[in-house]
Amino acid sequence: MPWTRDDIAARAARELQDGFYVNLGIGMPTLVANHVPDGMTVWLQSENGLLGMGPFPADADVDADLINAGKQTVTAVDGASFFGSHESFAMIRGGHINLAILGAMEISQEGDIANWMIPGKLVKGMGGAMDLVAGVQRVVVMMDHCNKKGAPKLIPECTLPLTGRHCIDMLITDLGVLEMNTEARRFELIELAPGVTVDDVLERTTAEVLVAESVTAH
């Protein structure tokens, strides 16, 4: 069975390390906050001015003034801090965030990302995505391998407006995990979701990808 959204988030959480400063994009990446391993200290940063986000609140604990960049209510852990967005973006642009976990509409075979708009649809703007993919030390993308129409999202070249070029280090989808091979400038399939085969991934991918000599099967 392919991974669920929660499974993808749990796999993405394995990329966390103790003491990391991490930015979670809106949508599916916010689920990673619920999978931080016990005993690990990770500081979740939101570009609207919060460092130290916790899991989503229970209904009884909702504070309408405490939101993330996606306008979702969140919690704050002990030691959290609040500041202006100018300081938040200084952290991002200055390379002080260890890891960003983002969603995407399209990913190219060379690691380009399109994740902020579909032409003809009303959007509020790019938000912090452009700064994140340019300034963060490592960028991981979580997404469904195909869109709602069944078309691949890992493609030779992005057709939607780009957020950044050559900036994605790892891609985690419902079918498995692909890591960027920096020498070949192509993604390499390294893990498979339960019941998924290498052929399943290749059949749903139009991008040129590599296959690791030993692919981990779950």
Image (spheres, grey):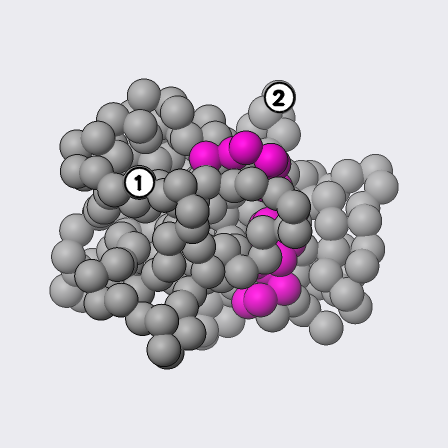
Nearer-N-terminus badge (1/2) = 1
Q: Which secondary structure, mark 2? A: loop
Q: Nearer the viewer, residue 144 or 183?
A: 144
Percent position of residue 113, x then y: 39, 43
Tell me which residue sits at (67%, 39%) in the image.
188
Residue 15 shows in the view: yes
Q: Which secondary structure, mark 1? A: strand
Classify residue 101 as left or right of residue 4: left
Tell me which residue sits at (29%, 44%) in the image.
50
| Residue labelled with disc 1 | 81
Can you tell which quarter of the image residue 21 is in? top left
Tell me which residue sits at (64%, 50%) in the image.
37
Percent position of residue 209, x then y: 63, 42
Farthest residue, direction front: 78
Classify residue 27 as left or right of residue 89: right
| Residue labelled with disc 2 | 183
Percent position of residue 166, x then y: 44, 30
Residue 190 is a magenta residue:
no
Location of the C terminus by quadrant is: bottom right
Find the distance from the CA under tag 1 to the CA under tag 2.
40 Å
**Callout 2 amino acid:** Glu
How busy is the neighbourhood of tag 2: few (under 14 within 10 Å), some, or many (20 plus)? few
Percent position of residue 106, x then y: 42, 52
* Span shown in magenta: 5-21
Location of the N terminus by quadrant is: bottom right
Farthest residue, direction right: 214
Classify residue 131 as left or right of residue 79: left
The numbered disc on residue 163 is none
Q: Nearer the viewer, residue 145 or 24?
A: 24
Does 25 appear above or below 145?
above
Residue 156 shows in the view: no
**Callout 1 amino acid:** Ser
